Image (spheres, rainbow, N blue to C red):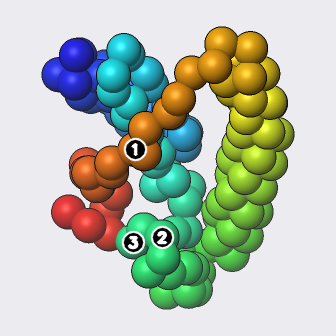
Amino acid sequence: MQQKLKDARAEIEAILKKHDIAGFVSLHAPGFGEVFYTIWPSYSILVGDYPSIRIKSKAADYAGDVARQLADQANTAGMAHHLGMSLSQFGMQFLDISTALTQQLGVEHVEQSFEPEPSKMNPGVH
């Protein structure tokens, strides 16, 4: 099952790259989960990954194109805001669903292990 998720992740990352968009994805198959994100579309001024993320938006990076620089700054801030707000909203909804299922079904959850696998789309890592 884990390979199924890794294959799906690769396809989704390719779609995000093809369309030059950011995204956060959480996948699940019985016994396994895969979570990843990309915050590095062409308009992103972010370099690296959390917690060592940096902002790259100097005038020299834009050859004096102030309008493009300001647009990238606004679009990056909008991206982070959208992802953060939607993740928190939907995260709370899924926690409510999980709590209800856990209570009604009496299931026990095991502690998740985490194997970090950075996105191949992160220009600050590769």
Rendering coords of residue 31 (x, y %): 33, 22
Say left or right for 33 vs 21.
left
The residue identified by callout 2 is 50
Between 54 and 108, the one nearer to me in the picture? 108
Q: Eyeballing the image, is 87 above or below 93?
A: below
In the image, what residue occupies the spot 57% across and 21% down? 107
Residue 28 coordinates in the image, percent (x, y):
43, 21
Q: Quadrant of residue 110?
A: top left
Q: Are marks 3 and 2 in contact (CB under 8 Å)?
A: no
Q: For the residue carrying disc 3, how many other residues have a C-alpha within 10 Å: few (<14), some (14-19), or many (20+)?
A: some
Q: Earlier in the sequence, mark 1 or mark 3?
A: 3
Mark 2 or 1, nearer chain start: 2
Of labels 2 and 1, the one closer to you: 1
Residue 58: percent from left, percent from top: 56, 86
Report the residue at 65% width, 71% height from top. 69
Label 3 or label 2, whichever lies nearer to me, is 2
Helix, strand, or loop for circle 2?
loop
User: Is residue 43 shown to the viewer in this render?
Assistant: yes
Q: What kind of element bears circle 1?
A: loop
Residue projecting furthest to the front: 106
Q: Mark 1 = which residue?
A: 112
Q: Nearer the viewer, mark 1 or mark 3?
A: 1
Task: Pick the quarter of the image with the N terminus.
Answer: top left
Residue picked out by circle 3:
48
Q: Identify which amino acid the numbered label 2 is placed on.
A: Tyr
| Mark 2: few/some/many CA within 10 Å (<14, 14-19, 20+) | few
Label ID, residue 49: none
